[in-house]
Amino acid sequence: MKPIDFTVVIPTFRRPNELREAVTSVIGQHDVEIEIIVVDDSPERSAEPIIASINDSRITYLANPRPSGGFPSAVRNLGWPPGRGEFVHFLDDDDIIPAGYYAEVKQTFAKNPNVGVVFCRIEPFGNCSPSQLQHEQLYFEKAARLAMFCGRLRSARAYVACLLFHWALLVCSAAMLRRQCLEHLGGFDPQLRLREDVDLYARAMRQFGVCFLDRVGLKYRIGSPSLMHAPELTQCDLDDLRAAQRRTNARYKSTWGSFEFYALKLFARTILNFS
């Protein structure tokens, strides 16, 4: 049995056409060994016939025995422990991976054996208005510029400062982790409904290091309105965001100390704000 390079965890909820596209983009990766674990969060197991029709032995279908009702952290945490890949990729069910990207990520990890996280440029697409798509393109272009700036500083703390206090450098599907790094961290915080990816990747970058690949490695589907840049948030979303930020900040201060926490906050509000 060949060793697996990438375990690709795809949580899904009632998006059969998009799921098929996402899975197909992973199956099409070359020069790497992959396995795909699809975790169906719908009570009616709506993804099962899609996976059966694709009929690829590298895909494992898991039905969430207790559908989360919108808790992606909990759903993703079901998918990665049974995997065998050296690296783990959490791919949303409506995103697409460009051809050849996994092979480049594998090479990057090999060249940087002490790095736990690799992430990439993001290319938004979707059936949204031209003005909204342009807004998203400009947003992710700035994220890439900031990532390159942080890379020139050669400090994982710079990436973390940006993530926690300044700009979302990435979305969940844009990063990959070494399995040993993920195991050490215990996966996503299951108490977080929002910002769970920021929390995980900030922890992983700070403890295990990070590389940014200056190439498009993710085609990120934009809905209308954008989930990331919704014009109005519900009170529930606002409450969850504040709670997630408090929990993430408290954990960082507890782990790395208040001095570093506030130094990073100052760095983000000054240097990064003018970069």
Image (cartoon, rainbow, N blue to C red):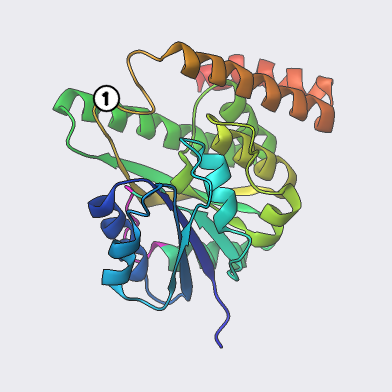
Q: Main secondary structure of the magenta part?
A: loop
Question: Element type at marker 1?
Answer: loop
Question: Is residue 270 in view?
Answer: no
Q: Is residue 8 left or right of residue 135?
A: right
The residue nearer to you, when weighing 8 against 30, is 8
The residue nearer to you, when weighing 64 against 266, is 64
Q: Residue drawn 43% across and 37% down?
A: 144
Q: Residue furthest bottom?
A: 1
Q: Which residues are magenta?
A: 94-101
> Which image quadrant: the N terminus?
bottom right
Residue 142, percent from left and from top? 40, 29
Residue 114, percent from left and from top? 71, 58
Q: Residues within 10 Å of mark 1 (few under 14, many from 20)?
A: few
In reply to whether residue 29 is colored magenta, the answer given is no
Q: Is residue 45 above or below residue 31?
A: above
Q: Residue drawn 32% across and 58% down?
A: 98
Q: Is residue 148 above or below residue 128?
A: below
Q: Amino acid at mark 1?
A: Pro
Q: Is residue 268 left or right of residue 142?
A: right
| Residue where numbered disc 1 is placed | 225
Query: Quarter of the image holding residue 85?
Result: bottom right
Q: Residue drawn 32% across and 56% down?
A: 22
